[in-house]
Image (cartoon, rainbow, N blue to C red):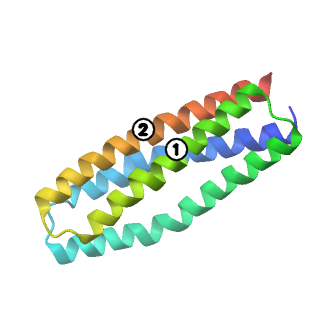
Amino acid sequence: MTLAAALLLAATALHLGFQAVVTLVVYPALRVERDAPAERWRAVHDAHSRRIAPLVVAVYGVLALAGVSVLFDGIDVWQGVALGLSGFVVATTAFAGAPLHGALGCTDDPARRAALLRRLAVADAVRLGGAAAAFGAAVVGAVR
């Protein structure tokens, strides 16, 4: 296994672990708070956003660095699939997750929050599936 392949494998494993924690721990905690009074909801959501943003940047940064290393090393088909799937997850975050969070931070209506959280759960399931598939492809690429 090349160093670049090992880096991609580690980055996709990190990403999968991060996404699994978000799916299984973080978002269920947000759903518990969905009926909170507006002041409490905003504090909970703002705290979540402040805590998660640096982690998202770090994890996606590691993925980007691993992707660049694989491109310079000579990418194989499975590594290309892993990179494509990782890019899909990042795009899902940018075009679904982030806008939903923006809307969640601006609403005082618990019913609207519940609807937005349901949509966020769907986007999150897509991200978890994409992260898992990317890791699987990186494993195949690493052991080729």
Residue 122: x, y in percent? 33, 41
Q: Which residue is mark 2?
A: 126
Eyeballing the image, is 45 above or below 90?
A: below
* Labelled disc at residue 28: none
- Disc tally is 2
Name the quadrant of the C terminus: top right
The residue depicted at 37 percent of the width and 72 percent of the height is 47
Q: Secondary structure at mark 2?
A: helix
Eyeballing the image, is 36 above or below 66?
A: below
Q: Secondary structure at mark 1?
A: helix
Residue neighbourhood size for the residue with mark 2, other residues' Cα within 10 Å, grouped as few (<14), some (14–19), many (≥20): some
The residue depicted at 28 percent of the width and 64 percent of the height is 103
Work out which residue is located at the far front of the displayed protein and give it.
95
Residue 56: x, y in percent? 54, 59
The residue depicted at 13 percent of the width and 71 percent of the height is 37
Mark 1 in CB contact with mark 2 (< 8 angstroms): yes
Is 83 displayed left or right of 50 in the figure? Answer: right
Instruction: Measure the alpha-carbon separation of dots 1 and 2.
Output: 8 Å
Which sits earlier in the primary sequence, circle 1 or circle 2? Answer: 1
Q: Report which quarter residue 124 is drawn in.
A: top left
**Three-letter residue code for mark 2:** Val
Residue neighbourhood size for the residue with mark 1, other residues' Cα within 10 Å, grouped as few (<14), some (14–19), many (≥20): many
Q: Which residue is mark 1?
A: 89
Residue 115: x, y in percent? 19, 51
The residue depicted at 44 percent of the width and 72 percent of the height is 50
Is 100 displayed left or right of 141 in the figure? Answer: left
